[in-house]
Amino acid sequence: MNHDNDMKNRIPEKLHGGMYIFTTEGDRNILYADPNVIHLFECDDFADLLNYLGNNPSKALHPEDFAQAKSTISASSADRNYRHTYLKYRILTKNGKIRYTESFGHRVISDDGKSYYYVITTEITEDEFYKEYSDSFVNVQINSMNRKIDNLTGLMNISAFNDDINTDAFDVKNHICSVAVFNIINLHKINRDKGRSEGDNQIRLLVRAILTNMPHDCLIYRGYNAEIVVVCPDLNEQDMNKHIKKVIKSSNEAVFYGVASTTDSFVHADIPPENVSVQDVLNEAELDLNIKKMLTNESSRSESLSSLVRALEQVDQDTEEHVKRTRKMGIALGKRLGLSDTQMSALELLCLLHDIGKIAVPLDILNKPGKLTDAEWEALRSHPVKGYQIALAAKELRPIAACIKYHHERWDGRGYPSQLKGEEIPVLSRIISIVDAYDAMVNDRCYRRALSPQVAMQEIKDNAGTQFDPQIAEIFLQLLSDKPKLMRGKKTGGDELRVFEETTEHPAATGNTRPVVYCEYRLDVNNIIIEVDELFENITGYAPDEVIGKMSQFDLIPEEDRADYRIQVGNQLSKTDTAFLRHRIMRKDGTVIDVVCHGTRQFESATRSFMSTIQIYED
């Protein structure tokens, strides 16, 4: 073969288009593509093109053009006399770029009866694309369509979504419909560190992943704040999640998502199933997305949640471990109950913040080891309402505000604050009520020792139908039996409660026992003594008016011991809010005695600062 003639017969390279061959029959659809077509799709070679298109050229079609292109090709395939096809459509390249194309296809019937399409496709300008765009190709006018297209992604924008709500396509009464909302994690950091052009490119790549992995009959929109909204008719949440996982797996950057369906029980509103609209489902999916952002450390929205949890930890020493355990049990129980994706996210948030109202309860009540007075009980029982008020003040927490308020209601209507009964209580409140009660029973608290898991489970069983939702209680107990690791407390004690009584003086006994001599005092954030009890003077020799506001706790330590004392206390408080050690103190008269010291650092909600409670026992 003459080499020169061979070169002359090649298709010229670097044209704005070329030819490819495909068939709708058999396993392999794309049979040939010349270098110009490969270049048009921004692929490296033919294998790269097949990998991108998944052996199906329609995979790269813009979602708004897909239905018409598919309809035209189907009509051509069905009519043996229909040999030629002319189409204008947009494609998305491998790198997410939108290109406008004009294609002419010719169908050839092989000897074995199969249809093959020879397609010449050419890139055209946007103006050329819209100039002769036939109304038979789309159902809207071109001027109107231009206003509904997002320039970055080529998707319909939120304005188009709002218009489509009133069309038959969005009539979901008596139909299943699911909505997913996608967003790139830390897109603001990508824009800041690599430039907005890179951020825009990542959005386009996310759109490509969505187009590739979502069903072709889905409607896709560019929403607010770089969100991509996907509406899938006739798809339930479970099936929707299968497609979402594929999108996340094929995405270049980490992706947030929220999902909801018309079949879900909504968290944000009590809407009868017959009145649910696509807008309601979108609102629920947006809620799911926003909660996940709060729960993810990689999002800036998590900072506000972390601040609230830290504030709660300062007033309640048990909070940090307690919320970890309830979160783990709550998620496991929610899955057993078949909660929707949004309900699961809200439950996880509720596990963290159900006791947030405690930051408004005085510290001496929260950490009192003895029996509470009626007034103190009333103050403690106010924390669900206070938590409700705190949640209402934060937009992101409003959907779980009612769940916080009612998490101490009882199934029999004898709970607080509103005496709700049975299913009047929100389902998430009923769940956290059981999880919270169990965790409290199997872990030591300041007012009593932990119960064994077996005793705590029996308590849940005995109170099912009175305090707890009986169905949820049964499923929870089965969960603990199936997963023994969940049932353990961090510090499980004996079966008996530890009851603290007020200290009373007893006459000295004749045996080897004697009363313990101790006193208690309090320090402010600067370690200045701000309060002492009536026994302080007996041990130290100092009257209250001689020390309150005038002396530091270090003034009680012999000078030669102070450096070591500071080091020991600092080491212990760097790991926990409790210090326990043996040391010496110097009395007012100059004598030195040995004591055992127990100190607790706490956050005082009234003064919004740290304080410490110190107990010293004469050794």
Image (cartoon, rainbow, N blue to C red):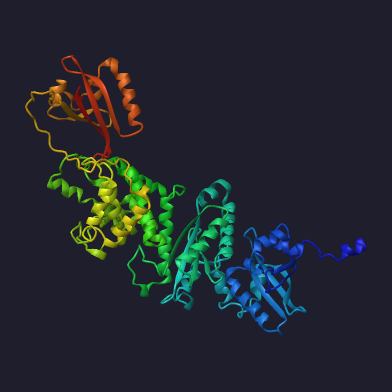
User: Which residue occupies the foreground of this view, 252 or 1?
Assistant: 1
Looking at the image, residue 59 lies above or below residue 542: below
Residue furthest right in the image? 2
Q: Position of residue 439 (x, y in %)?
A: 29, 48
Q: Position of residue 428 (x, y in %)?
A: 32, 59
User: Which residue occupies the foreground of this view, 358 or 321?
Assistant: 321
| Rendered image quadrant of residue 284 | bottom left
Quadrant where the image shows the C terminus: top left
Q: Position of residue 588 (x, y in %)?
A: 16, 17
Looking at the image, residue 218 lies above or below residue 475: below
Residue occupying the point 50% across, 52% down: 185
Query: Is residue 357 among the parts visible in the rendering?
Result: no
Q: Position of residue 82 (x, y in %)?
A: 70, 83
Residue furthest bottom in the image? 81
Query: Is residue 227 among the parts visible in the rendering?
Result: yes
Quadrant where the image shows the N terminus: bottom right
| Rendered image quadrant of residue 152 | bottom right
Number of disc labels: 0
In the image, taking residue 11 as reference, residue 371 lies left or right, namely left
User: Which residue occupies the foreground of this view, 597 or 274?
Assistant: 597
Residue occupying the point 66% across, 68% down: 57
In the image, taking residue 458 as reference, residue 309 lies left or right, namely right
In the image, taking residue 124 as reference, residue 501 lies left or right, namely left
Looking at the image, residue 452 lies above or below residue 131: above
